[in-house]
Image (cartoon, rainbow, N blue to C red):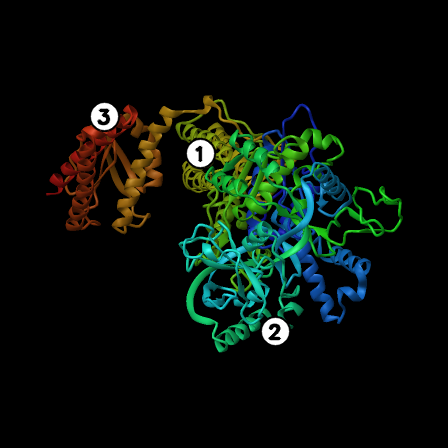
Amino acid sequence: MREQLEKIYDPKQFEDKIYQYWLDGGYFTPQPDESKKPYTIVIPPPNITGQLHMGHALDNTLQDILIRWRRMQGYSALWIPGTDHASIATEAKIVEAMKKEGVTKDDLGRDGFLERAWEWKKTYGGRIIEQLKKLGSSCDWTRERFTLDEGCSEAVKQVFVNLYEKGLIYRGERIINWCPHCLTSISDAEVEYSEKQGHFWHIRYPLSDNSGYLELATTRPETLLGDTAVAVHPEDERYKHLIGKTVTLPLVGKEIPIVGDTYVDREFGTGVVKITPAHDPNDFEVGLRHNLPIVNVMTDDAKMNENAGKYQEMERYDARKAVVEDLKQQGFLVEIEDHTHNVGACYRCSTTVEPRVSKQWFVRMEPLSIPAIDVVKKGDVKFVPERFDKIYYHWMENIKDWCISRQLWWGHRIPAYYCNDCGETIVSEQEPCSCPKCQSKSIRQDEDTLDTWFSSALWPFSTLGWPEKTKDLEYFYPTSTLVTGYDIIFFWVARMIFSGVEHTGEAPFDTVFIHGIIRDTQGRKMSKSLGNGIDPLEIIDEYGADALRFMLATGNSPGNDMRFSEEKVKSSRNFANKIWNATRFILMNLADEVDSVGLPSHLEIEDKWVVSKYNALVREVTENLEKFELGIAVQKLYDFIWDILCDWYIELVKSRFQEGGQTGIDAQKVLIYVMTNTLKLLHPFMPFITEEIWHALPTGDISIMISAWPEYDKNLDFGEESREFERVMDAIKAIRNIRSEMNVPPSKKASVFVESTFAETFEKGSIFIERLASASEVKVGNQFDVPGAVQVVTDCARIFIPMDDLVDKKKELERLNKEKADCEKDVTFISGKLNNEKFISKAPQNIVEQEKQKLAKASERLAKILESIADLG
């Protein structure tokens, strides 16, 4: 028993019901099946702090389109969902909530805080998962993972230990990026740079022997309190005689050495720089080379510390003002120069980061980056669009060691332990009972946690059971396509590639499909500060998930940003409504004999035309999806359904429905065949409406999402018949256009005379011209003399419509003269091309032939227009 479609399209009535139907059917849950090819996508795990935003909606719509398409193609298609613990973001949210209660982390202690964090995850962590379901995401929820779950945690520990034992993880004092707000180190990739207006403060450093002074410039005068040297280039003739001498540090009064180092650019400024190893990464390297002391003058939260003397406890920017004023008062300040420079900020909270010397854990990147570059160069991993591989290469070839320790409690605790008696460091997956060196049982674990991206980097294989050799891992890994925005290529994509190669011996996926970000109508990035964010759930509630998905796919181009438009969502909903109403029309006219999907043995010319168009659509949409041209594919589907199927074919066969008999049944069979198979092509983009309609049609399959993807069939390519029928369609369009221009109502019938060498074609098509072009009669011949008639010209016909009482002869001549001018312009342009020797010699022969055919058609059309003008004259 087929379901009935409601009179009005209302997605609220069936979207949730259909999603539950899919879940109950287990259609999202594939099994390893050696008779099928695997196709795997891992979701970029959203943070447990997150709520669904338009970026998530875009990313997950694109993934769902791909997974549904491959599932229908017969792949064992697995889309692994999950969430990320998001150390910094989650801890910040929990601390903020505790602050309102007057509770701090220290009040609770580590264990108490982690209990609170897991409770928070239980309350809020699944929110975004439920929201993804509203979008229609066909993830396998039975395989849902969390970056802090037991299996992922075991993978993290094993990777850490393996890398440590290979010498690829080490602990050492290095200069790192420190966020004074989040109170943790962050990696280079987590620093966002932007241009800021600042100053160069030019300062005199007196030579200690009172023989003069050195002048230098700095953008951060407050850090001079931590200077331990000034540097000049060792071959700079101006200063090399001073190397080994000392200067007296302004405001502090202590002597610091003048060192020679090739780091100094002789051409920049005065050729003298201050060296502050504790507060600048380049200065830190200079300090290592010259064995300089490291003097840190700031606290964790960017206030001045005890090494800052009288400036202690001042906030860093207040201290800057005070230091500058004192330099001025004491005669050390030469001038202040305006200067624009790049300033790094924490990507989470936008606080300006502080370079800071700290003992941290690092991954040695060079040995890992080389094979990760090779897999892309060899083509084992392809970027779509290809231009993003250059960005990947640039980052990987210039990568620095990765600081992986974070001063947080929520996250994977570093599996390193220290003996309190002998100081031995033990790195182990299991907590050691005693020190292997001195057998002491007094052991403590490292307090720090790992960078969130450390666990995310293992996501493609840890989610499939690695390090265990599970069936899922053996069958579904390496995964197939990674879908992600260009903004996390460095954070995530690069790290997954080198982690996959290092730990599994294979690249973790074969294709990285990069999409842009979704902006507002003005092209601005959506953000809380601008207040221009759009809640996808509100859009779904008003227009339905299919309308939002269709809008996000329409116009989407790999790697490029797109703009959100509610008008486009409305247009997508109108499209869904069009499909709904077309289906209802089909069902209302469906005979009982039509109880399956299949073409009749006999096809009329209009049937061959629509079947041929559908067949070409199958080929083109499949090719577009293979190339990740989702926006192009969905536009072709829109054009076919709206224009060819609904506006043309259904109108063409209405008379056959009315006539009944075999011709009516055959038309119904063609319509059912084309509609059901086109719904299959549309399903990945609009899954809900296609499933609801599927159950109302005589399909026989239990769900459209597990039906077979259509394949191109050369036997359904009726090229000649299609071209023949399109001559009739062109005539109908031309007649409709002229009647519209002349404001002739459809109810006003008129005789139509068709003058053409394709007489048989137009004789057969006369029934369509009568019905679709408001013709009272159609006469076809080689030549007609219809005085005072309105004339229209197509590529293969001249059409006369006697409308003396309806047409303004003067306006008709104006229209024909305008057509003549446009046609003459085309003839001149194409002739110019064909008379150009360079074009003829360089263009491929098929292109030249196409241009010649265009010229012949344009010339023929011009001749007919001139003839029409003469007739009216």
Left or right: 789 with respect to 236? left
Left or right: 487 with respect to 84? left
Quadrant of the snapshot with the N terminus:
top right
User: Residue 510 location, x and y as percent?
Assistant: 57, 33
User: Residue 76 location, x and y as percent?
Assistant: 65, 31
Dot 1 corresponds to which residue?
Answer: 656
Dot 2 corresponds to which residue?
Answer: 311
Secondary structure under tag 1 reads helix
- Crowding around mark 3 (Cα neighbors within 10 Å: few <14, some 14 to 19, many 20+) is few
Residue furthest to the bottom in view is 329
Foreground residue, 386 or 617?
386
- Crowding around mark 1 (Cα neighbors within 10 Å: few <14, some 14 to 19, many 20+) is some
Q: State the image quarter where residue 30 is shown.
A: top right
Label 1 amino acid?
Arg
270 over 651 or under it: above or below = below
730 over 264 or under it: above or below = above
Secondary structure under tag 2 reads helix
